Image (cartoon, helix red, strand yellow):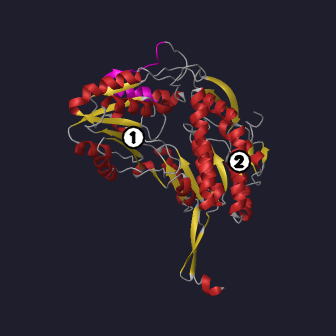
Amino acid sequence: MSHNLQFYIDGAWVDPVVPNSFDVIDPSNEDSFAQISLGTKADVDKAVAAARRAFNTFGFTEVAERLDLLNRIITVYKKRSDDLALAVSREMGAPRQMARDSQVGIGLAHLTKMAQTLKRFEFRHVKGNNLVVKEPIGVVGLITPWNWPLNQITCKVGPALAAGCAMVLKPSEIAPLDAIIFAEILDEAGVPKGVFNLVNGDGPTVGQALASHPDVDMMSFTGSTRAGILVAKAAADTVKRVHQELGGKSANILFPDVDLATAVSKGVAGCFSNSGQSCNAPTRMFVPRDRHDEAAAYAKAAAEKFTVGPADAPGTKLGPVVSQIQFDKIQDLIQSGIDEGATLVTGGPGRPAELNRGYYIRPTVFADVTHDMRIAREEIFGPVLAILPYDTVEQAVEQANDTVYGLASYIQAKDIKKAREVAARMRSGNVYINYPQWDASLPFGGYKQSGNGREYAEYGLDDFLEIKGIAGYEAAE
């Protein structure tokens, strides 16, 4: 990559104001395999100024022009899919095929869905003698995480472009290479200069500068709840809009009538997907108390089928977690489960025996988990499942909702009427009944400390728009 030590600002690859090299680590082997440069407030100022100039033109383009731009981006994105997959796999540890099919594939799905959405989206409607208009909010700052990097880049950049916004993207410094390739894609697709800008850097420097910048009209942030709070505080002085998709501790309630073997196995797979590094992972499995031991046995069998290994090794189903920091945090929480009296069904502390380098976690299942344990309360962000027994569905619902988070909930039941009744009571932005297929048209976002605002399709597009009422519009003609 020729641009990894540069930023993309005002339609060109430019050197940082002050170079500051930073190693990108391959979590499969703990080796540095690339370097980027971390930015400063001065780089952010340049990027925001470019975006502000560009918005004065791009904010008034026709829908057809923006739609054509999105379609060109999709074409180039497809062409660069292998490059994107390799970058994601090396920087955050996703197994090669999963990186290609899921990590890159989900980005393509968002871009495609946004192009479809833009075709039919109504930006204005008459109301009596008045006109209601949806207009781009202006210059937006985008901060994206390392766990599903292309998912979050595309479901922010896509609607921002569709709306007519100009933007500055700060990807995670841990997994930045896919974002650099994405910037190359946008450049090749002919995004007007200044409309899209990329500045690499860390949260306390570049993230803070973006969030507090007086010429940034909106912040869209995905990451931890802790970091999201800091973004909101930094943005408060300029009263800009802040949309956040934050942490989660999603409950998976298995009703007494389910096929337990299937429901548990699919629940383990959902929890362990992406090495457990998904904010909406179903990490708390609620099962009927009289079938608890049976559920634990099914979970053990399912977990032990996951082959842990390097991202580039054939047959790897579970790659490493992303960093030493994440590895240490997960190890601490696994140990807390043991110390607090949960039953360790499989897995546990340390790396798998055959792996002595890399941030590998043993696929872990705890049973006999109680609602007050750390593993039932804190977001682990690794392949660790907690099984909690319940006496009544009412008790399960109460405990499932008793969390500071509210991103997703999962319900498994043969009786769809009862499943729908419980879905209505779940305090989460999404509820998934009987493991449905992922849908890019469904709104995504959280309640409570899982954030605010919604992403995907028209819901994401709406979040990048202001609403203007023009009174007397019809009478004025």
Secondary structure beneath dot 2 equals helix
x then y, percent, for residue 40: 68, 45
Residue bearing mark 2: 73
Q: In the image, which disc is placed on residue 379?
A: none
Residue situated in front as seen by the camera: 293 or 398:
293
Question: Does the magenta-highlighted stretch encompass residue 346?
Answer: yes
**Residue at x 50%, y 25% (from the top left corner):** 318
x then y, percent, for residue 441: 52, 51
Left or right of 367? Residue 382 is: right
Q: Is residue 265 visible?
A: yes
Magenta span: 329-353
Mark 2 or 1, which is nearer the eye?
Answer: 2
Question: Does the magenta-highlighted stretch encompass residue 85?
Answer: no
10 Å neighbourhood of mark 1: few (<14), some, or many (≥20)?
many
Instruction: Quadrant for the N terminus, please.
Output: top right
Q: Of the residues shown, which amino acid type is indicated by label 1?
A: Lys
